[in-house]
Image: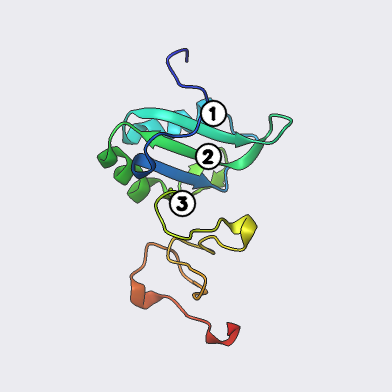
Amino acid sequence: DPQAPSSKQKTEDAYKTLFVGRISYETTEKQLRRELERYGDIVNLRLVEDEDGKCRGYAFVEYKDEGAMKAAYKNADGKKIDGRRVVVDVERGRTVRDWKPRKLGGGIGDTRLGGADVNVKYSGRYGIDSFHCDTSLG
């Protein structure tokens, strides 16, 4: 799509941007765009690639408006794309103070409820009373 912004550029508005993880390494930007544009107009989709141009399994999707981002956040988590169930979350790197990505020892754990002090055992779709906090981790 010649109108689509380059996948190499950073998204502009972190509050309209979603993180999409657990993407198949075979998934293309075109496939991902087709699945996620049903929630609203996509301004930028950045499928993160390694130095050889291969998908690293995650992407950032910036929507035109926050309502579309919220619809995708609510409905796309756990959706099967290219044979794999993806995880969808808000873009925390620029919106959450002191956020560290998983590769630096942070991340959200198994679901969107997780944090450094919580070992989440259930899907992020359940209420706050539905998770197990493992206090033996110290």
Q: Secondary structure at mark 2?
A: strand
Q: Which mark is residue 7?
A: none
Q: Taking 76 as reference, is 51 above or below it?
A: above
Mark 3 vs mark 1: in front: 1
Image location of residue 36, percent across then percent down: 41, 35
Tag 3–tag 2 contact (CB < 8 Å): no
- Find residue 41 and report its image quarter: top left
- The answer to whether residue 25 is seen in the rendering is no
| Location of mark 1 (residue) | 29
79 or 40, which is in the foreground?
A: 40
Q: Where the C terminus falls, by quadrant?
A: bottom right
Q: Residue at x 42, y 15 (%)?
A: 3
Q: Which mark is residue 78?
A: 3
Q: Secondary structure at mark 3?
A: loop
Q: Earlier in the sequence, mark 1 or mark 2?
A: 1
Q: CA distance from mark 1 to mark 2?
A: 9 Å
Image location of residue 26, percent across then percent down: 65, 34
Q: CA distance from mark 3 to mark 2?
A: 15 Å
Mark 1 vs mark 2: in front: 2
| Location of mark 2 (residue) | 59
- Residue type of the residue flagged with mark 3: Gly
- The answer to whether residue 54 is seen in the rendering is yes
Tag 1–tag 2 contact (CB < 8 Å): yes
For this view, does 115 lie left or right of residue 84? left
Counting the numbered discs, the total is 3
- Residue type of the residue flagged with mark 1: Glu
Q: Residue at x 44, y 52 (%)?
A: 92
